[in-house]
Amino acid sequence: MNIFSSARQGLLLVLLLLSVSGCASYSNSFAPIAADLAKDDLNGALSLLDKAKTPGRDRLLFLMNRGMLLRMQGEFESSNEMFSAAKQVVEELNALSLREQSTALAINDGTRSYAGAPYEQVMLNLYSAMNYLALGQLNQARVEALQVDLRLGELADRSLGALFESDPFGRYLTALIYESGGEQSDAMIAYRSAYEAYRQHQKSYPLDLPRQLKLDLLRTSEALGLVEENHQYAKEFDLKSWPNSEVLRQQGELIFLFNNGLAPIKIEQSVTLPVPPRGQLVRVTLPAYLRRPASFSKARLRIGGLEVVTETFENIEEMAIAELERNQPAILARATARVMLKYQMSKQAGKQNDLAGLLVNVAGLFTERADTRSWMSLPASIQLARIALPPGEYDLETELLGPAGESVKTLTFPQVRLAAGKMTFISCHAVAEGSLLGRH
Amino acid sequence: MSINRFCSLFAVLPMLVMLIMLNGCSTQVNRIDPDEVKDLSGAWNDTDSRLVSEEMIADMLERPWVGDFRAKTGKRPAVIVGTLRNLSHEHINVNTFVADIERTLVNSGRVDFVASALERQEIREERKDQDLNAREETRKAMGQELGADYMLKGEINTIIDHASKDQVRFYQVDLTLISLADNRKVWLGQKKIKKFVQRSKLRY
């Protein structure tokens, strides 16, 4: 047997493995962009994102991040172009690719096309809807609301014993869209689904049922004449009074959306072990979430003599962590299968030639990387406040509160126009202390 | 298998991969007839827009309200297209649909057609401009517009049912023709489209 040629064979195998796997962890590559976001430098973040080479398999992430950054800049229309392209990618990736599955088994999970976690797919529709609401295009937002219903229906279908087959904020936002279009009964159904979604999510992580949702359930059930349901809610929530639907219709409503911080990032955790008797090394890597500390806890709004503090409607951080925990057994199973395969490969190569065996072993170790991809420009949580006032123009003052409830930064939104029976949507995304993004 | 043959296989493999990739790179363009039915994703497309508008307007013009109006007034009815609400699951371009309706209506020659509110504004401005700048004999007077007798309104609704990767998409387009004089509904049209979409379970 020719020693040289078998070493060459090993080398070729190594090169092949290395060329396919994107070695640098994805979450590392996003760090400079996040740093720009924290510095409030949106243009810098955008140009970094555009300059970074995105492989085809990460196209969805590029579109999602680009859409988010454009949104923070107030470019809602271009942002929606990104999101709608992203939705198309999700649709295409719905089908299973055997080629990618086998590559993932031989190299690592990161070689697959990224199709987005289920909650991220829902977020695509929600942020599109919020863009349309910011543009005042209620009919288009309604289309997104229907797509949210459809997507949540599909998620419930597909996953067996799914952790999240619903999305609390998703349901709530659709309820808002229906209600602002005067569709009370659709809104009621969505409020009810939101309530169920909160109860479902509460089983996995701590999440308070927003007081606002309680009031909405009481008000809408009363307006629709659902007497028994209304009494039941009143008893359950221990609330005696809530705004009257008729009175509310005479007023204008401000819906303030506070996107707080950034979603957690995935890091890599690995174990490397020698296998006797030949001492080949095997390595198992798994992704794990790392929380990004939020600089702000809540936002306090002052408008027209009222003072309201935002409530958390969606805890993306906890959702992401719970979702990964649920998927961990499957990720571990794939990693174990890969360890076996790579071990066999290096053993086979080693039988022919020690050097080849070593090379294949090293390549196997090198390519064993965790899939650390996720939509990292999402906020850690979405908070909301809903304020009703007589129609007119108001100056809105927003105080961002620190972890201990101290006021850290104040923002003003001058001349907010509230019209009778209409909802006005304002949102902001705060990334780090002293840095505010996407004021509009 | 000898190792040499194994090696040469490795040399050939990248070339094959490159050939396949290059093949995927070239853009192909084939011109097709605008009337040709080409369903790609199962979403609402140009064919749906055209079929629905043609069929519904044909039905509308056959109904007795046209004859009734002529018998009563001796004139052709003047129609205007109002809002067409998209209540479906998709971002349907309502404008092309409205344009299709307008075209079919005008070309039928059985009704007069009034420009929409937005178009009227532009024309009024032009008339104002004529008042200042155009020669007397070519000037068009203001206050001579044709008022519409009927307004066409409508909505597009969808119901989507799904199981795993299969979908049944049901579209219902409702159009209503309302008399501007007395709010009477003189014609109700409905067109349904049902599609069964099987999404592919495998990709490359």
Image (cartoon, helix red, strand yellow):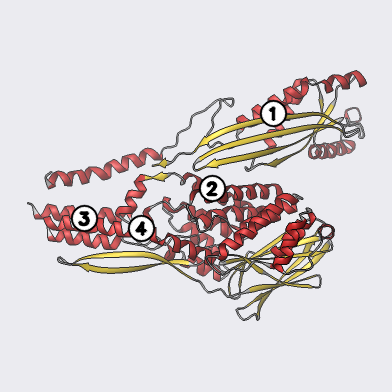
Q: Chain of mark 3?
A: A
On whether disc 2 and disc 1 are found on a single subunit, the reply is no
Residue A432 lies, with reference to residue A134, above or below; the image says below
What is the x, y in percent for residue A269?
A: 36, 68
On whether disc 2 and disc 4 are found on a single subunit, the reply is yes
Checking the image for residue A154, the label placed there is 2
- The amino acid at mark 3 is Met
- The amino acid at mark 1 is Ser
Disc 1 target residue: B53
Checking the image for residue A32, the label placed there is none
Position of residue A301 in the picture relative to residue B185 (left or right): left
Cα separation between marks 1 and 4 = 51 Å
Q: Chain of mark 1?
A: B
Disc 3 target residue: A345
Position of residue A84 in the picture relative to residue A109 (left or right): right
Q: Residue at x 52, y 51 (%)?
A: A155
Residue B148 lies, with reference to residue B69, above or below; the image says below
Position of residue A285 in the picture relative to residue A220 (left or right): left
Q: Nearer the viewer, mark 2 or mark 1?
A: 2
Disc 4 target residue: A22
What is the x, y in percent for residue A212?
A: 71, 65
Cα separation between marks 2 and 1 = 32 Å
Circle 1 crowding by C-alpha within 10 Å: few under 14, some 14–19, many from 20: many
Closer to the chain start, of discs 3 and 2, is 2
